[in-house]
Amino acid sequence: MNTDPRESLMEASRQFYQLGWMAGTAGNLSARVEDGSFWITASGKQKGKLVADDFVRVSLTGELLETPNPENKPSAETSIHQAIYSCFAEARACYHVHSVEAKLVTNLVEGEKLPLPPIEMLKGLGVWEENPQVFMPVFHNHLQVPKIAQEISDRFHRETPQVPALLIRNHGVTVWANSAAEAENHVELAEYIFRYIVAARQVGIKF
C-alpha cells in the first residue's frame, strides 16, 4: 500500500458523490499507512471536490498526527474508523457512505441484524455458499458517535460479522477491506444489495 493513500480516497469520494452516496459533506473515507495511523477525510468537506489538503492523519487512539490545513478537524465519525481498525488488524481502508437505500433498509428490521438476499453479489463480500443465510450487523444511531463506535467494538469482539460491512440506523453503511480498491468494491456491492432489498420489498419478497 502506498504511504499516502489520499489520491485513491479522493477518486472514490468523487465517484460516490456522483452516485448520490456522499451528498454534500456527508460520509467519510479513510485508509491506513505503514505505521498503523490512517488518513481520513476532514470534517465538513464537500465530498465531490476533495483535494489532498482536505484530510488529516490520526493515530488508532485518535491523536491528530498530521494536517495539511491547520483549520482541519477529523471527521466526527473518526471513532468508528478507529473501532474497525482496532477490531480487524488486516483492514487497510474503511469507507462510510450515506445512500438513501442504506437508510431505508434499516427500517425493514427491528433487531440488530439485516437478513441479506442469497444473491451472487454476496461472493464479493466473501460469502461462498449455496443459498447462504447471511446477516449484516445493524447499530443504533446514537447522537454521540463514540457511543456507536463503542457498541461496534463490543459486539465485534464478541462475534465476528459474516460480511465486512455494518449499518447504522437511518444513517448509512460502513465497509472495510484490506485495500482501498477492495473497500470501494465493497461499497458498490453493498449498495447493490440494498437496492435489491428495497425493490424486493416493493413486490412482496422478504428474506
Image (tube, rainbow, N blue to C red):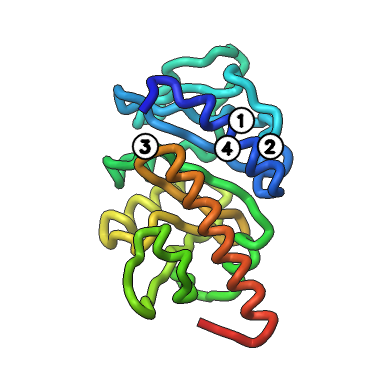
Specify whether 26 is left or right of 168.
right
Q: Residue furthest bottom?
A: 204
Mark 1 sits on what residue? Answer: 43
Amino acid at the residue labelled 2: Thr
Local SS, label 4:
helix
Q: Is residue 34 above or below residue 135?
A: above
For disc 3, the neighbor class at 10 Å (few under 14, some 14 to 19, many from 20) is many
Specify whether 3 is left or right of 116.
left
Mark 2–mark 1 CB contact (< 8 Å): yes
Local SS, label 3:
loop
Q: Which mark is residue 75?
A: none
Residue drawn at x 58%, y 58% as measured from the top left: 191
For disc 1, the neighbor class at 10 Å (few under 14, some 14 to 19, many from 20) is many
Residue drawn at x 45%, y 76% as measured from the top left: 118
For disc 4, the neighbor class at 10 Å (few under 14, some 14 to 19, many from 20) is many
Amino acid at the residue labelled 4: Ala
Q: Which mark is residue 25?
A: 2
